[in-house]
Image: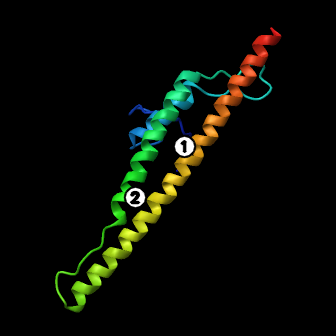
């Protein structure tokens, strides 16, 4: 059954289920601070202080992720016994730790790249804002 989809969080309406609080916050931010459509004549406005605060929070997350990766660096599972099952459990656990460490390193790298890109965008916005102010 196809019905029109209304995005929102009210129980009484058709809506997209947003079980994660982060999804709800992103949705709220998208609704409140959307970029105007191209060609609309409306200026793009950015709260630079909030954007810089967000960058600081992302940097904290990146540091936490890096620390978690470092915590896994020296972990190795010793089999509780000499039987085949114990050795296999230890070997599989070591593989999962290695995969987890690789995931955390990749995540950290992506966070650092995202922070750099966002910082560059904020700087470009501030430059454009300054140039526009000088023209006015």
Observer-nearest of 76 and 46: 76
Q: With 49 as the anchor, is 136 left or right in this view?
A: right
Observer-nearest of 47 and 44: 47
Q: Which residue shows up at 36% across the image and 69% down it?
A: 97
Callout 2 crowding tier (Cα within 10 Å): few <14, some 14–19, many ≥20: many
First-in-chain label (1 vs 2): 1
Q: Where is residue 30 in the image (x, y as percent from the top left)?
A: 56, 31
Disc nearest the viewer among 1 and 2: 2
Vertical order, 28 against 100 (above or below): above
Callout 1 crowding tier (Cα within 10 Å): few <14, some 14–19, many ≥20: few
Residue 69 - label:
2
Q: With 28 as the anchor, is 74 left or right in this view?
A: left
SS under mark 1: loop
Q: In which quarter of the image is the C terminus?
A: top right
SS under mark 2: helix
Count the labels in the image: 2
Residue 15 appearing in the image: no
Gap between marks 1 and 2 measured at Cα: 46 Å
Q: Which residue shows up at 39% across the image and 38% down it?
A: 21
Vertical order, 94 against 107 (above or below): below
Q: With 50 as the anchor, is 125 left or right in this view?
A: right
Tell me the residue that label 1 is attached to.
3
As drawn, the residue found furthest toward the left would be 81
**Which quadrant holds residue 77?**
bottom left
Q: With 100 as the anchor, is 124 left or right in this view?
A: right
Observer-nearest of 53 and 17: 53
């Amino acid at each position: 059954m196809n019905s029109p989809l209304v995005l929102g969080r009210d129980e009484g309406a058709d809506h997209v289920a947003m079980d994660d609080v982060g999804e709800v916050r992103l949705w709220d931010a998208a609704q409140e601070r959307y970029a105007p459509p191209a060609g609309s004549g409306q200026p793009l406005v950015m709260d630079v202080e909030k954007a810089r605060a967000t960058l600081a929070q992302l940097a904290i997350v990146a540091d936490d992720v890096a620390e978690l990766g470092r915590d896994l660096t020296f972990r190795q599972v010793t089999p509780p016994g000499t039987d085949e099952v114990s050795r296999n459990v230890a070997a599989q656990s070591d593989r999962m730790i290695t995969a987890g460490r690789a995931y955390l390193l990749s995540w950290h790298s992506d966070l650092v790249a995202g922070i750099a890109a966002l910082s560059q965008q904020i700087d470009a916005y501030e430059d454009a804002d300054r140039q526009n102010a000088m023209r006015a």
